[in-house]
Each structure stands twice: as structure tokens, then as C-alpha cells.
Image (cartoon, rainbow, N blue to C red):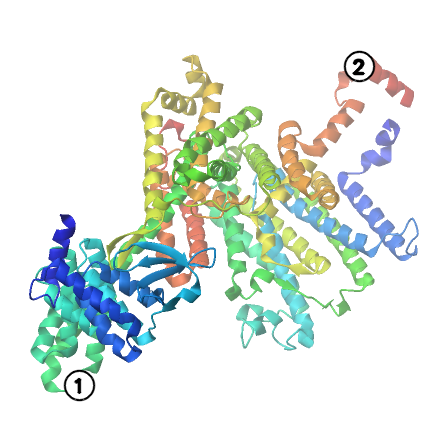
């Protein structure tokens, strides 16, 4: 039923189907045309192809597509037209183009190619694109219209003129209108050009702007053209203005995504350094462990790449958290109140962890695959598209941030952590096991670093030095935001990220990085306690 | 042993004389063995060893600089490698200009990398770099100026402790990134290398190498004497007091920031001199010297040797560097394990480093307290024997 309906639909809207034709008639016409294919000379081919396309049957695609790619053959014995593909035994796998019936494979000698040339292939490409214009799936139609917008051709424009009234989808219709307007701008009278230029104002497709600029350049310097000239430049200005706005939005997006990476890297540190006051130079290596956990999980379950990241998040939390607890129990608890010594000892640990990873996984970078749902981008309009992996990183970072905030503010563990960080002796007097809380807090901070590592594995190379690249930035974020203040960390990370990305276009990535570093150092000189200093008695 | 330690001569000798004497004797010995004994002789010291020792002495001077600020003033600088590298670059620029037209491109004015970048003239900051006096001035002024600006900003706003450490690290990291850029005009990634001669002497000749080694030893001795003088002066007392209780020093009426800036600048200059002597001996300077890892390695020398004792810094630098040379040759894999382990163990078990260990042992041999005699019969017996 659906098939019949779609056929009818094709018939009604296709440009030469002024008279309704029945399916059988149509098919017999097509069969007759296809039978001519083997015997037609190259110079007579163009009208034949056009006629085939004009039948608007579902088989047209199956015939023209292989003809364009050079896969259309006919059997020497009975002139049956087939699509042929070479299989592993060097034989040709045949499919009848009319019935879609699969025929037994034959040797190369039994078939002969239907010849085409570049001009014909171009014609077929146009025809196929226009064929898609009437496709029942609107995404295919949209794609076809976009294609046509980029490479306009006369047949396409004619069909768009006919199709635009019957088009149901808003988006497709708009694009069709743009195509027609551009055509008008090209070929129409001055009045038509005027109205086209006015209507095109504010369209974001790059083609529109190019076309307007082209028209403006071509316009002869005559007084009667002044009005058109004014309208054209007005439209171009409008488009450029929009482009600047979207450029800013895109920069902001890049900045926020960089900020999210910084946030992820710094947030674990905000706990170990900010809340506990422990300088953990091995923090970067906790991230590295998280990234390697992702790698190991992908190696263990090669069939589940799509889910590997979801599995890696808890696994990385556990691995890094466990190592963190070990470090706290083994080293840090003996160095209470000696921050500089802690710094040195944890730096030693970071060297050991790096070398460990180097010995186990080799010093080379490891490839972590991106699952399908992380690739591609979300297209908001022709000038602005947001890549999914950056989008997910932003969401993920915010998720981690708010869950951590909840843990610290609402759970009893968080209460204990805050109590111990504010007044250890008093907390102990209230029967909080402070050493246990220390271990858990450090494990939590490290575990979150591990989670950050999972996210980083999607952005950078997974290698033994992964953590080192982030450690200085993370410390700066925490200090910039104000030690012991999670909200400060959020603001600081996003500010740093956005600053970096806004400086980058004019200065290049390295210089903008340097400027941000220097700027931060100067800022800390002015406000040593960061953006949001802790107030009250616990401040010192 | 006891006898020797108690002899009036040793008692009168301060650590300054002791260190300088050891430096003098070992330098003399190495020079003698290098020049007098022929190759293949058991006592011969090869040219390679001379260069290696020269490198160690540079490290020792660098460690001394870090010890001065960390051990005596409590400023844990994780960016002293930057001063070292700046001194090195100052020397490198001079050496680069000494190549003259013997470079690959044969340009008498411009170093090779500038020709390669299609530059037509020297950048302004290379002006006068072919003059030895300007070079010496730069070796002091470059690191000194950076230390002055950084220090006066940081110490005036009372940034201290861990914050300061992280900021120094950020400083050297920013410099690392900048020097990697070709546009900086310091050779970018490759740095400055391919040197030919210094003050007109070929860098390849063994005699020049020996002379550089001796010069380094002399510089170290002078540096040590200066540091010794500083820490024992009235100013040094204030500096130590700042380390122990900065607020009290401020309340008493001193301005700690002035002292801190001052000692930071002196220390940076010492590090710069170490870098300047290092470059001709290893034949290259590149941005890698700015890497934060290098700076932290310096700190571990001092920590292992024993901070707060000037000689400890020297011992630490030489011992750890020697261990590094040996271990990276025998089993390169194990070196980072070893270094990392050292960090952890020293901070946990030897907070005062090797020097602390030695002085503990000395105290056991010769307890400082008056009531020592009755404490340990065994010790008493050995003491009696020695007498």
C-alpha cells in the first residue's frame, strides 16, 4: 500500500507526469528504454538517460547509480542489463536492474560494460540529485536540496520550481526558495533581483553570501543600479553581522568545552588540595590511570566499543580511587602539616606511576576509540555546528561537578569531610574517625581525577605523560578560583577556557596559553586567595 | 676518627674552608691526572670524565642557589631551572655569534636558524651578543631581572608557601612554551647548538674543556663563599628568621619582602652563572631546560643532600647526578623508579637529607650534651680507646 502510494506520489509531483500513468504502463516504458541501453551509441545516450529518469520509477536509482559508477553491464548472450560487482573469486556478481533478482555469478568474458563518459556521468549526477528531491524521506530531500544549492544546475532549478508548491517540509521548502532566489538574482530582471536580494538578507548559507558578493561585483556602475547596489550591500552586511555573532557563539562553545576539560582536571584537585590541603602532584597521574583504564576496557571488550566509555567511568573511579587511598595511607598521612614535603613525595609517586605505565604499556601513545555516538556534530544552522564530543564533555563535566557538590553538601560523608577540614580536633571529639575520612576524601578526589581521565582519553593521546600536561593548569584553576571553594573552581575553569579560546584566533594556541598563564600569575599576585576567598576563621 | 675530628685544626675550620679545600684538592687532582698521566694509565682521568665532572659542578652551583632560597628562606622555588636556562641562553647567544661564517649557511652576521627563518637582521635583543662583556652582563642581568620582577610582585603581595611554588612552576612552564616558539628568536625547538669556540679557544680541544672545568670549580667556590657569607651575616639571620616565623619578623619591624626579593635575586644569579658554565660544556641549550621536571629535580638534589646546609646541597647534586649517569646507562627503565622512590623515602625518612644523617651520626660519636658520659657505656669505651 505504502509502495503504491509513494509511486503515485512520485507520479503526481514529477515534472513530466502531467498525465497519470498506471504502474504497468510505466514499467513497460522503462523496460523498453532499458533494452535500448546496450545498443545505443555514446552520443545518443544523453536523451535516453533523460527518458529513463523521466519515468520516475523506483528502479531509476538502481539503473543510473551503477551506470554512473561504471558498474552497469549487459549479458552478451541475451542483452539483459545487470549491475555487476567483482567478488573474491574474480567473478562477477550480477543483479538484474529491473527486477532486483540476483543472478548466478559469471566470468568477465560473459558481460560487457555499458559505456559512459564524464559528461554523461555529470548529467546522471544531476538527475540522481534531483531524483532525491522527490524522495519520501525528508532528510534525503534536505540533503538533495543542499547539494543543489552548492552545485546549481538548470534541470534541478526547473524541478525545484515545480516541486516547491507541493513540498510539505518547512526546512526543505525554505532552502528551495533560496535556490530559486539565487537563480532570480542571477538571471532575473532588475525588479526581480531587487526583491530576491531583499529576501536573501539574513540567510546563513555560505553560497548566498558568495552569490550576493558576486552580483555586487558584476553590477555595472550606473545610476539606475544604485538601488539594487544599496540593497545588495545591505543584505551582505546583515549576513556578515550574523556571521560575527555566530562566530562569537562558536568561540564561546569552544571556550566552554576547554573550560570543562580544565574543570574535570581540577575538580578532583579541588577536593584533595582545596578541602584537605594536600598538594598532590600525582593528581595528573590519577587522570592518566583513568585514561589507561578506558584503554584496557576497550581491549577487554572489543565488541562493546559503544558502551566502553560508560563502563570505564566507574572502573576508572575505582582504579584511581584505590591508588589514591593507597597513597594516602602509605605516604601522605605521615606528612601532615608539611605541605612542601607532601609536594615532593607525591611528585616522586607521580614519577613512579609514569614509569610503571611506561613499563607495562610501553612509552608509545595508545589509541582509545571513540564510540559512534561521540562522533559527528549537531548542526544548528549552516554557520554553527557543535561537535558531539565537546558537547558531551561539557555535560559530563557539569554532571560530575554537581554530583560532587551534592556529595559534599548533602551526604553524611560530605559532612564529615567538611567537619574534619574545618576543625580536625573538634571533629575527632565528636567521634568522627578523621584518619578514615582523610583516606576516603583522598580516594574520592583521586577517583574523580580518574573519571576526568576517561573524558581526556577522548580528546588527547593516551600516553604516560598525559597527566603532566594538565597538572599545572589544574593547580592554577584551583588557586585562581579560591582554595576550598568548588563554585570558584567552576567559574575559574570556565573563565580560563573561554579566555584562552577568545585569544587563540588572533594569537595562536601557544601564545594565548602563555598569556593566560602570565595573566593568572599576575592575578594571584593581586589576590593571593583567588576569585572567591574563604571567609571566616577557617580561612588561615 | 674522634681524634681527627677533635683536633684543633679541624675544629677551627669552618665548613667554608672545608668545602673550598675539598674543591681545590679534587680539582687539582683531576687536572693533574688528566694532564700528567698518559691515556691508558690507571690514574688517568679522561677528557670525557672532566666534562662530566664539570657538569656536576654546574649542578652543584645550581643546587646551592636553590638551597639558599629554600633551605634558608623557606621559598620552595619549582622554577629555578628557568634562571639556569636563561643564563645558559645568554651564554648560548654569545657562542652562537662566535660561529661567525662557519655555519651551514655561512652568514657572518646571522646564526643559522635565523637564516633558515628568512630573517634579514638580528632582533634587537641580540644586539651586542657577540661581546663577551655584554654576555657576562646578561648572564647576571637576565635571571636577576626576572627574579626581581617576579619576586617583588610575589613577595609584596605576600604570596607564600605552596602558592608560590606553583607560581614559580607556572613561570618556568610559560617560559618553556615561549622558547619553543620560533618567533622568539632563540632557535625554537632546537635551541642553540653547534658552537665552535669560546673567547677564541676551540670548544673541542681537551685543554678548553679542562679550563672550563676549573672555571666551574672556581665559580662554585666563589658562589659557596658568597652564600656562606650571606647566611652567616646579620642579613642571613633575618632571612632564616623569615623562614621560621615570617609574621614575627614583620611585627618586630623588618620588611620581609625586601629580604626575600634580595635573596631570590642573588640565588637566581647564581643559577644563571651555573647555566652559563653548563652550556659550553655540554654544547647545547634548548627549551627543554625550562621544563618543570628539571626544576623539581634540582629540588630533590637539595632535599637529598640536606637543605639548610650549604654543603648538603653540593653533596646532593653530585651524588644524585652521578647515580643518574650510572643508572640511566645500566638500566634506563629503573631510573625513574629510583628517582621517584628517592623523593618518597627522603621526605618520609630523611627530612634533613644526607647532611642530617651525617650530623646525627656525628652527634652519636660526639654527643653535644654535657651529660653524655654516663649515657652509653659502649660509646664510652670506644671513646676511651680513641683517646
Kindly indicate the quadrant of the structure image that contains residue B22: top right
Q: Which residue in the protein does label 1 denote?
A: A220
Image position, residue A509 (x, y; %): 43, 57
Q: Which mark is residue B376?
A: 2
Residues at discs 1 and 2 both on one chain:
no
Mark 1 belongs to chain: A
How many angstroms separate mark 1 from mark 2 (CA)? 111 Å
Residue B346 occupies quadrant: top right
Q: Which residue is found at the position 21% from the left and 63% from the top?
A: A131
- Please give the name of the residue rendered at 43% of the width and 64% of the height, measured from the top-left corner: A108
Q: Is residue A278 visible?
A: yes
Q: Residue furthest front?
A: A77
Give the quadrant of the C terminus of chain B.
Answer: top right
Image quarter (top left, top right, bottom left or bottom right) of the N terminus of chain B: top right
Count neighbours of disc 1 (C-alpha within 10 A) and say few if under 14, some if 14 to 19, many if 20 or more.
few
Q: Position of residue A157 (x, y in %)?
A: 16, 70
Q: Quick check: can you spot residue A240?
A: no
Mark 2: secondary structure: loop
Viewer-proximal residue among B8 and A217: A217
Tell me if A156 is positioned left or right of B274 in this view. Answer: left
Front residue of this view, candidates B15 and A215: A215
Mark in the foreground, 1 or 2 = 1
A428 versus A347 height, above or below: above
Secondary element type, mark 1: loop
Image side of residue A248 versus residue A533, left or right? left
Q: How many marks?
A: 2
Q: Position of residue A370 (x, y in %)?
A: 41, 45
Residue drawn at x 80%, y 47% is B23
Tag 1 and tag 2, C-beta contact below 8 Å:
no
Q: Chain of mark 2?
A: B
Q: Pinpoint residue B329: horizontal percent, then vertical percent.
A: 74, 46
Amino acid at each position: 500500500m505504502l509502495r503504491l502510494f509513494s509511486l503515485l506520489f512520485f507520479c503526481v509531483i514529477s515534472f513530466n507526469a502531467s498525465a497519470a500513468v498506471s504502474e504497468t504502463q510505466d514499467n513497460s516504458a522503462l523496460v523498453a528504454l532499458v533494452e535500448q541501453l546496450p545498443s545505443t551509441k555514446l552520443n545518443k545516450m544523453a536523451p535516453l538517460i533523460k527518458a529513463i529518469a523521466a519515468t520516475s520509477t523506483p528502479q531509476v536509482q538502481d539503473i543510473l547509480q551503477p551506470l554512473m559508477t561504471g558498474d552497469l553491464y549487459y549479458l552478451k548472450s541475451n542483452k539483459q542489463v545487470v549491475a555487476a560487482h567483482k567478488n573474491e573469486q574474480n567473478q562477477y556478481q550480477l543483479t538484474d536492474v529491473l527486477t532486483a533478482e540476483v543472478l548466478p555469478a559469471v566470468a568477465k568474458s560473459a558481460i560487457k560494460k555499458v559505456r559512459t563518459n564524464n559528461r554523461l556521468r555529470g548529467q546522471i549526477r544531476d538527475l540522481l540529485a534531483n531524483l532525491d528531491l522527490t524522495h519520501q524521506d525528508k532528510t534525503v530531500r534536505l540533503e538533495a536540496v543542499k547539494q543543489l544549492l552548492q552545485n546549481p544546475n538548470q534541470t534541478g532549478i526547473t524541478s525545484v520550481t515545480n516541486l516547491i508548491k507541493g513540498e510539505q517540509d518547512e526546512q526543505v521548502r525554505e532552502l528551495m526558495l533560496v535556490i530559486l532566489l539565487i537563480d532570480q538574482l542571477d538571471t532575473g530582471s532588475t525588479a526581480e533581483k531587487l526583491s530576491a536580494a531583499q529576501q536573501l538578507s539574513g540567510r546563513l548559507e555560505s553560497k548566498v553570501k558568495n552569490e550576493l558578493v558576486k552580483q555586487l561585483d558584476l553590477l555595472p556602475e550606473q545610476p539606475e543600479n544604485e538601488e539594487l547596489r544599496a540593497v545588495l550591500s545591505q543584505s551582505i552586511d546583515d549576513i556578515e553581522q550574523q556571521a560575527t555573532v555566530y562566530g562569537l557563539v562558536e568561540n564561546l562553545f569552544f571556550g566552554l568545552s576547554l573550560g570543562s576539560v580544565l574543570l574535570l582536571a581540577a575538580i578532583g584537585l579541588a577536593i584533595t588540595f582545596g578541602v584537605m590541603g594536600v598538594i598532590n602532584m600525582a593528581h595528573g597521574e590519577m587522570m592518566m590511570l583513568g585514561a589507561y583504564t578506558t584503554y584496557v576496557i576497550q581491549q577487554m571488550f572489543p565488541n562493546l566499543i559503544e558502551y566502553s566509555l560508560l563502563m570505564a567511568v566507574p572502573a576508572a573511579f575505582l582504579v584511581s580511587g584505590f591508588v589514591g587511598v593507597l597513597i594516602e595511607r602509605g605516604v601522605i598521612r605521615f606528612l601532615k602539616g608539611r605541605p612542601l614535603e607532601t609536594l615532593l613525595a607525591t611528585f616522586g609517586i607521580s614519577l613512579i606511576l609514569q614509569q610503571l605505565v611506561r613499563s607495562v604499556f610501553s612509552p608509545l601513545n595508545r589509541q582509545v576509540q571513540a564510540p559512534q555516538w561521540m562522533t559527528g556534530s549537531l548542526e544548528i544552522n549552516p554557520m554553527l555546528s557543535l561537535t558531539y564530543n565537546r558537547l558531551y564533555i561539557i555535560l559530563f563535566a557539569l554532571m560530575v561537578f554537581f554530583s560532587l557538590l551534592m556529595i559534599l553538601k548533602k551526604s553524611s560523608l560530605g559532612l564529615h569531610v567538611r567537619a574534619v577540614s574545618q576543625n580536625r580536633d573538634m571533629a575527632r571529639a565528636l567521634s568522627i574517625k578523621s584518619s578514615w575520612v582523610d583516606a576516603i576524601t583522598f580516594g574520592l578526589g583521586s577517583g574523580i581525577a580518574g573519571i576526568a581521565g576517561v573524558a581526556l582519553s577522548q580528546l588527547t593521546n593516551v600516553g604516560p605523560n598525559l597527566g603532566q600536561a594538565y597538572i599545572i593548569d589544574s593547580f592554577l584553576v584551583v588557586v585562581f578560583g579560591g582554595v576550598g571553594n568548588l563554585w570558584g573552581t567552576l567559574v575559574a575553569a570556565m573563565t580560563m577556557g573561554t579566555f584562552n579560546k577568545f585569544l587563540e584566533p588572533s594569537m595562536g594556541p601557544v601564545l594565548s596559553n602563555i598569556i593566560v598563564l602570565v595573566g593568572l600569575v599576575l592575578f594571584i599576585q593581586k589576590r593571593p586567595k583567588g576569585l572567591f576567598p574563604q571567609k571566616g576563621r577557617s580561612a588561615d | 676518627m674522634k681524634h681527627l675530628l677533635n683536633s684543633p685544626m679541624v675544629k677551627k675550620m669552618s665548613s667554608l674552608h672545608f668545602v673550598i679545600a675539598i674543591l681545590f684538592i679534587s680539582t687539582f687532582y683531576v687536572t693533574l691526572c688528566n694532564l700528567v698521566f698518559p691515556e691508558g694509565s690507571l690514574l688517568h682521568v679522561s677528557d670525557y670524565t672532566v666534562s662530566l665532572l664539570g657538569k656536576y659542578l654546574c649542578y652543584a652551583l645550581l643546587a646551592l642557589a636553590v638551597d639558599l632560597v629554600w633551605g634558608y628562606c623557606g621559598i620552595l622555588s619549582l622554577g629555578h631551572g628557568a634562571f639556569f636556562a636563561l643564563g645558559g641562553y645568554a651564554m648560548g647567544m654569545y657562542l652562537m655569534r662566535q660561529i661567525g661564517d662557519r655555519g651551514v649557511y655561512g652568514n657572518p652576521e646571522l646564526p643559522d636558524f635565523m637564516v633558515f627563518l628568512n630573517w634579514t637582521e638580528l632582533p634587537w635583543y641580540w644586539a651586542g651578543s657577540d661581546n663577551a662583556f655584554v654576555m657576562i652582563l646578561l648572564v647576571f642581568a637576565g635571571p636577576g631581572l626576572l627574579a626581581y620582577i617576579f619576586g617583588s610582585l610575589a613577595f609584596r603581595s605576600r604570596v607564600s608557601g605552596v602558592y608560590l611554588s606553583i607560581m614559580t612552576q607556572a613561570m618556568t612552564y610559560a617560559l618553556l612554551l615561549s622558547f619553543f616558539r620560533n618567533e622568539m628568536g632563540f632557535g625554537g625547538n632546537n635551541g642553540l647548538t653547534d658552537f665552535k669556540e669560546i673567547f677564541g679557544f676551540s670548544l673541542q680541544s681537551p685543554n678548553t674543556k679542562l679550563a672550563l672545568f676549573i672555571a666551574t670549580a672556581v665559580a662554585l667556590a666563589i658562589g659557596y663563599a658568597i652564600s656562606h657569607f650571606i647566611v652567616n651575616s646579620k642579613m642571613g639571620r633575618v632571612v632564616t628568621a623569615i623562614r621560621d616565623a615570617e609574621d614575627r619578623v614583620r611585627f618586630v619591624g623588618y620588611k620581609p619582602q625586601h629580604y626575600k626579593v634580595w635573596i631570590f635575586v642573588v640565588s637566581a644569579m647564581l643559577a644563571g652563572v651555573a647555566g652559563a658554565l653548563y652550556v659550553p660544556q655540554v654544547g647545547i641549550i634548548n627549551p627543554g631546560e625550562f621544563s618543570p621536571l628539571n626544576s623539581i629535580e634540582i629540588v630533590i638534589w637539595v632535599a637529598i643532600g640536606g637543605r639548610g646546609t650549604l654543603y648538603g646541597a653540593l653533596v646532593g647534586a653530585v651524588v644524585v647526578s652521578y647515580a643518574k649517569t650510572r643508572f640511566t646507562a645500566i638500566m634506563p627503565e629503573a631510573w625513574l623508579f629510583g628517582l621517584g622512590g628517592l623523593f618518597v623515602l627522603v621526605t618520609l625518612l630523611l627530612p634533613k637529607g644526607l647532611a642530617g644523617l651525617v650530623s646525627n651520626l656525628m652527634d652519636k660519636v660526639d654527643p653535644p650534651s654535657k651529660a653524655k658520659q654516663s649515657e652509653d657505656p659502649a660509646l664510652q669505651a670506644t671513646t676511651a680507646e680513641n683517646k
